[in-house]
Image (cartoon, rainbow, N blue to C red):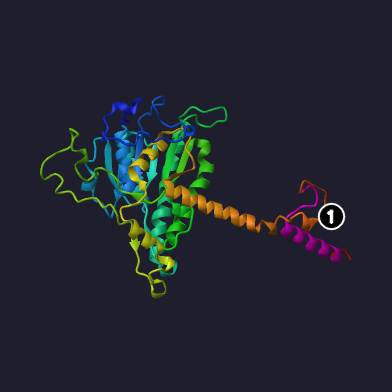
Amino acid sequence: MAADSPTSSTLFPTLNPNNTTSHLHLPSSTDPPSDTNPPTQKVWLVFGATGHIGRSLVKCALSHGDNVAAVGRTRENTMPQMQGWHERCLGLLCDVRVRATVRSAMERCIDRFGRIDIIVNCTGYGVIGACEDQDTADLRSQFDTNFLGTLNIIQLSLPYFRHLSTSQPTTSNSTPANNAGRYLIFSSTSGALGVPGLGPYCATKYATEGLIESMLYEVDTFGIKATLVEPGHMRLDEPTGLDDSAFTATPHQPTGPGVHQNMTKLARYGHFLVKKPSPPYDTPTAPAGHAGRVVQWLADRQPTSAVKSAELVWQLGHCRFPPLRLLLGSFAVESVRDRLRSVIEEIEDWKHLHFPSAASGEGEGEEEGGVKFEGEGDMMDAGDEEDGAEVKEEDEG
């Protein structure tokens, strides 16, 4: 049976009364939820719910009154670990590399809550090591999880979201008036810039970004939205975890001395494998060791808050006009901006190969204010045309 849809999340008690994220808001251009724009209850299907951002997002959505299907990893978690989180939370297991398990997670979510409104993919796996040191198994495991896992989720859920779009009222241009479904795909700053020591991992994120951006052009007419979430280095600042007494205050939750003793603690880390470097890369200052050194240096001092990020992602799920990309944290903003600036500077440095200066085309056309109106063209194209003209003359003669 479908869950009722209250008009405001204030109808539900919060899980964390000491909420410090109430001042965080997406830009008004996205039409985010607010006191004057109260959110309606949504159903979230969160893949990778046992990672640190996945856990924080599940808790945030529940605290706002949404329903959540939290999906753990088949080979990492057990069903007892996924049960008893909250009365509005359905615990599941899935391996995103296996399409049958993805389909099963979707079906069970619909059976429990009646629908799916938002699909989140937080799953990820990476190998830290030089590109030369990573073998075929390392490459395949990263691409199967990060890229093909995302593709499996999208291909299996798009027919469902497209069906939703046919049952909604449309605007004058035949576009659904309301969002027919939403994807929140966690990418990384590694999807926007190369990181030494994470080459293949970066490749999977670049591929995922290209996939989502291309898909969005294809499905926007159905009212389906998608956003790539690019967090910076994220710290674990949850006041409590989903595997401890965080939810024991709710009436349905069993309590007692032995309740949590029999539950294995959910892993907070472990989604990256640090590979032993080969001799050419096994030096204290080797660039290939950069990613590993950053992880060791940061420890628990990551600059980006998982709790605050989860609040913004929750708003992203409820806003009317989501962006294509959402960068989380100053590190993500500054690093991606610097990367794009360097690309633009490189383009400017080399554009003279294709756009000749005024001096090189002197006498070929009239100029006004340094702008050529006639005879200006791509140097590469111009060379081809001249060669072609010479050949034509030879043929005619």
Identified at 51% across, 43% down, the residue is 216
> For residue 344: magenta?
no
| Residue at the limit of the structure toward the left, as seen here | 257
The answer to whether residue 108 is left or right of residue 343 is left
Q: Position of residue 121 (x, y in %)?
A: 38, 46
The answer to whether residue 11 is left or right of residue 230 is left
Q: Residue flagged by tag 1: what amino acid is it?
A: Gly
Query: Main structural element of the magenta stretch: helix, strand or loop?
Result: helix
| Residue at the limit of the structure toward the right, as seen here | 397
Q: Position of residue 104 (x, y in %)?
A: 33, 45
The answer to whether residue 60 is left or right of residue 395 is left
Q: Position of residue 124 (x, y in %)?
A: 37, 53
Q: Position of residue 17 (x, y in %)?
A: 26, 33
> For residue 377: magenta?
yes
Identified at 21% across, 38% down, the residue is 247
The count of marks equals 1
**Which quadrant of the view contains residue 69?**
top left
Q: Secondary structure at mark 1?
A: loop
Instruction: Answer yes or no: is residue 267 visible.
Output: yes
**Which quadrant of the view contains residue 316?**
top left
Q: In this view of the protein, which residue sits in the foreground, 234 or 136?
A: 234
Identified at 24% across, 50% down, the residue is 266
Q: In this view of the protein, which residue sits in the foreground, 330 or 361?
A: 330
- In the rendered image, the quadrant that contains the C terminus is bottom right
Identified at 34% across, 43% down, the residue is 46
- In the rendered image, the quadrant that contains the N terminus is top left
Q: Which residues are magenta?
A: 371-394
Q: Residues within 10 Å of mark 1 (few under 14, many from 20)?
A: few
The answer to whether residue 39 is left or right of residue 325 is left
**Residue named by callout 1:** 363
